[in-house]
Image (cartoon, rainbow, N blue to C red):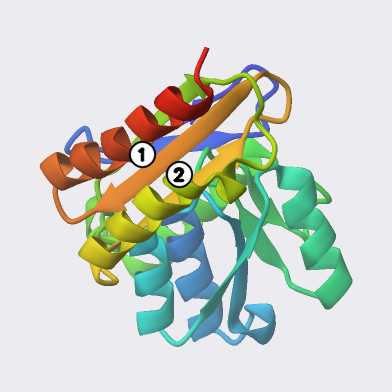
Amino acid sequence: MAFDGDADRCIAVDENGRIIDGDRIMFICGKYLKERNKLNQNTIVSTVMSNLGFHLAVEAEGMTALKTQVGDRYVVEEMRKNGYNLGGEQSGHVVFLEMNTTGDGLLTGIQLLNVMKQTGKKLSELADEVTLYPQELVNVRVSEKDGVMEIPAVKAVIEEVESEMAGKGRILVRPSGTEPLLRVMAEAETDEKCHDYVMRIVNVVKAEIGI
């Protein structure tokens, strides 16, 4: 288990040395709770950054994954508002609202170990139920980060890329909350496609409003 400085985030590493991020941890814990009728409304609250593979795995198990904007506080707000008891972020913030009011890395680690103990499965076996799509994120310094989706050239290239994806990937373009940056993220079936898609959008953004 690895924790950040204030220990509210937890990332695991399985016995094969593979990093198990927050998306997979949420799925593993969510499925375990659902099978025991302890996952409220069979729902996990995640953010827009959660991987498409996470969403597909959640749906395949008869659960629902709701999306909030990035930030664990938005996840907690949604959980409190509608009575959900599990949520978190890809970055390792995982909130078990019936046990704590915020992310707690040690608690997350204990919950993950408990699933392993109770199921008798290795972490790799549990994590293999989620096939994550390759993901690439590029930050672009821009002169104006608001209203970018209204720029015709940017809108056109995003629509073009999404059409090519045909449902087997996704694009997320969002402004940074603290810096003059636009974050361009793509997920696709292969690393090559992922890089191609994200750079096509990045190049148009740079040409239109890059600095």
Ranked by sequence position, the earlier of labels 1 and 2 is 2
Q: For this view, does 190 lie left or right of residue 67?
A: left
For residue 11, which numbered disc appears in the image? none
Q: How many marks?
A: 2
Identify the secondary structure beneath mark 1: helix
Residue 87: horizontal and vertical position, in percent?
64, 59
Where residue 76 appears, x then y in whole percent? 79, 55
Is residue 15 at least partly visible in the picture?
no
The residue positioned 17% from the left and 38% from the top of the image is 16
* Quadrant of res 5: top right
Does residue 29 sit above or below 108 in this rendering?
Answer: below
Q: Can you give x and y, in whole percent of width and height, for residue 104 in the image?
A: 69, 40
Label 2 crowd (10 A; few <14 / some 14-19 / many >=20): many
Label 2 belongs to which residue? Answer: 154
Specify whether residue 141 is in view: yes
Q: Seen in the image, is 198 located left or right of residue 30?
A: left
Q: Which residue is mark 1?
A: 201
Q: Residue at x 38, y 60 (%)?
A: 159
State left or right for residue 117 relative to residue 124: right
**Which amino acid is tagged 2?**
Val
